[in-house]
Each structure stands twice: as structure tokens, then as C-alpha cells.
Amino acid sequence: MKVKEIMTKNAKACTPISNLAEAAGLMWENDCGILPVVAHGGRVVGLITDRDVCMAAALQHRDLENIAVAEVTSGKVVSCHPDDDVRTALKTMQENKVRRLPVVADDGTLAGILSMNDIVVNAKEIADKQDANVSYADVVQTYKAICAHAAAHQQATQPRAAGV
């Protein structure tokens, strides 16, 4: 199954000069936790998550209206293509420990978003396809790889008991 068959089309996006209040509002209104950041012409140049907004709010001690999206996004964009197999996208998610990928067309413009939710919600359709190449184990393995990073980070930041 191809990414374009299950991705979220018409994904909302923001620009590098959008402020965090605008980005948070778009996420809230569209029930999503990530926005692609697009430059002039629609080329994907970054991503911003609800976590990025929360961390900036907690750590920068500035009004969200005064923080540009460009200040909190990284320049690295891990993406997939509409014609990629879902299994290829899962591998990309696994290797990069991400739950969502912007789907980027040949010209670098945003075609949609692919999330683990999209894959799980469409699992039956994926399995019913004659050329199904994504198994339950593939999905679980991807979640396991994504969550391993968070678990290792949590363990490293938890206070240790005296004498341990």
C-alpha cells in the first residue's frame, strides 16, 4: 500500500514567521499535534509539534505571540513521498524515532502528513490488500523503536535512590 492511500491530505501548515500562538491555534482547531513549516512556494522547511510549543512556553518565559516558529524548529526534516510504500515510511519513522512524517512531493511541497494513527486506523485495509507488505509486528516494532528513546530519556532523568 502506498503512503498516498492513507495519508492525511490537506494538512494544515504554518510558516517560519508564524508565531507560536498561531501555530497552537491551528493545532487546536484541527486536532493535530504537528504542523509542517512551509516557506514561500509551499516547500517544507521544518516541523513544529505541540511539545515544541509547550517547551518554549515553559522555558522561554515570553508570550507565545512573541516567539516565531523558526525559533523552535530544527532544520532537519525527515519525510516520505506519496508513492513510498507504507512499510518504507514505517522504517523511516523507526530509524528517526518519530510518529509522524510530512509527505513531500517531488518539488519539495507538502502533499500531506502520515502518522502512526493513519497506519493503525487503516490497518485492516492495509492487511486486506493483496500486496500487503505491512504486518502487525511491523507496526508494533515501529512503536517500540519510537518509544525506546523516550523510555531511555525518562530513566536517565529520574532521580536515583540513595545508595544505588
Image (cartoon, grey):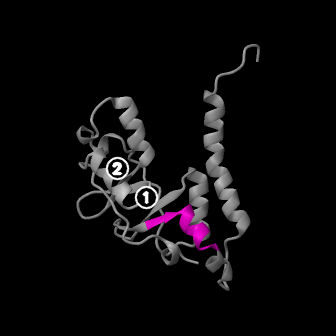
Classify residue 112 by image quadrant: bottom left
Q: Is residue 82 visible?
A: yes
Q: Secondary structure at mark 2?
A: helix
Characterize the magenta stretch by its predominant secondary structure.
Answer: helix
The one of 120 and 82 positioned closer to us in this rendering: 120
From the image, tell me which residue sits under label 2. Answer: 24
Name above or below for residue 150 compared with residue 106: above
Q: Does residue 36 show up?
A: no
Q: Position of residue 90 (x, y in %)?
A: 60, 63
Seen from this angle, which residue lies furthest bottom?
130
Q: Residues within 10 Å of mark 2 (few under 14, many from 20)?
A: many
Q: Tell me the SS state at disc 1.
A: loop
Q: CA distance from mark 2 to mark 1?
A: 10 Å
Find out whether the residues at labels 2 and 1 contact each other: C-beta distance under 8 Å.
no
Looking at the image, residue 24 sits to the left or right of residue 94; the answer is: left
Left/right of residue 138 with respect to residue 43 in the rendered view: right
* Of pointers 2 and 1, the one earlier in the residue sequence: 2
Q: Report the side of 149 relative to 22 (left or right).
A: right
> Horizontal and vertical percent for residue 36?
37, 57
Q: Is residue 120 magenta?
A: yes
Classify mark 1: residues with Cα within 10 Å, few (<14), some (14-19) or many (20+).
some
User: Which quarter of the figure has residue 71?
Assistant: top left
The residue lying toward the viewer, choosing from 58 and 141, is 58
The residue depicted at 76 percent of the width and 18 percent of the height is 164
Give residue 109's position: percent from left, percent from top: 34, 66
The residue shown at (44%, 54%) is 33
Which corner quadrant holds the N terminus?
A: bottom right
Q: Which residues are magenta?
A: 113-123
What amino acid is labelled 1 in the image? Answer: Cys
- Indicate whether residue 114 is drawn in magenta: yes
| Kind of residue at badge 2 | Ala
Which residue in the protein does label 1 denote?
A: 32
